[in-house]
Image: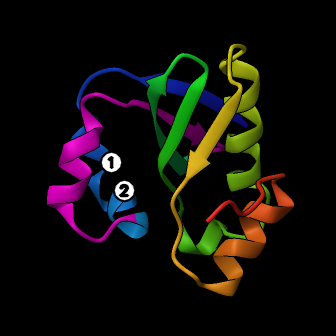
């Protein structure tokens, strides 16, 4: 499993980005200012985009795992990577819907519900 930062041509991953955020115009709002990472395990399996909101405060704007690769630890691996990559991280925010599977995933990754 190899995770690397994408600095150019982020829109090449639009199909994967749209799995997590169905509105391309919303993706466009954070894609360029955010940092993108892809997870490669004999092919791209997952991606995420994170933005810095303030000193030590980050927001996970987008995380997606290809449907046939879900429940194999790729999403959790990306989140663990982010916490080790951003050593100054005091808080990582994530906006979710109220889907039980989504909430369960984030809780298993150590997130707590704030509001």
Q: Give the x, y percent position of residue 31.
A: 28, 39
Residue 60 inside the magenta-drawn segment: no
Q: Give the x, y percent position of residue 65.
A: 56, 61
Query: Residue 41 or 65: which is nearer the viewer?
Result: 65
- In the figure, is residue 83 to the left or right of 66? right
Q: Give the x, y percent position of residue 69.
A: 65, 66
Q: What element carries label 2?
A: helix
The circle drawn on residue 50 is none
Residue 34 inside the magenta-drawn segment: yes
Residue on which disc 2 sits: 17
Q: Bounds of the magenta span?
A: 21-42
Identified at 53% across, 68% down, the residue is: 96
Which residue occupies the extreme front position in the image? 115
Q: Which colouring convention does the figure follow?
A: rainbow
Which is closer to the viewer, label 2 or label 1? 2
Identified at 58% across, 82% down, the residue is: 98
Image quadrant in which you'd find residue 104: bottom right
Does the residue at mark 2 contact the one at mark 1 (Cβ under 8 Å)? yes
- In the figure, is residue 89 to the left or right of 16? right
Label 1 neighbourhood size at 10 Å, few (<14), some (14-19), many (20+)? Answer: some
Quarter of the picture holding the N terminus = top right
As drawn, 33 above or below 26: above
How many marks overall? 2
Q: Give the x, y percent position of residue 76.
A: 76, 51
C-alpha span from label 2 to label 1: 6 Å
As drawn, 77 above or below 19: above
Label 2 neighbourhood size at 10 Å, few (<14), some (14-19), many (20+)? Answer: many
Identified at 57% across, 28% down, the residue is: 57
The circle drawn on residue 13 is 1
Q: What element carries label 1?
A: helix
């Amino acid at each position: 499993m190899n995770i690397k930062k994408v600095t150019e041509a982020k829109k090449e991953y639009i199909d994967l980005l749209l799995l997590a955020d169905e509105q391309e115009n919303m993706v466009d709002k954070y894609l360029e200012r955010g940092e993108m990472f892809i997870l490669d395990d004999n092919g791209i399996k997952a991606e995420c985009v994170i933005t810095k909101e303030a000193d030590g405060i980050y927001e996970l704007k987008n995380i997606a795992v290809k449907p046939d690769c879900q429940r194999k630890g790729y999403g959790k691996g990306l989140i663990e990577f982010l916490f080790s990559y951003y050593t100054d991280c005091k808080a990582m925010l994530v906006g979710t819907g109220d889907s039980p599977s989504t909430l369960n995933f984030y809780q298993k990754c150590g997130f707590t519900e704030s509001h």
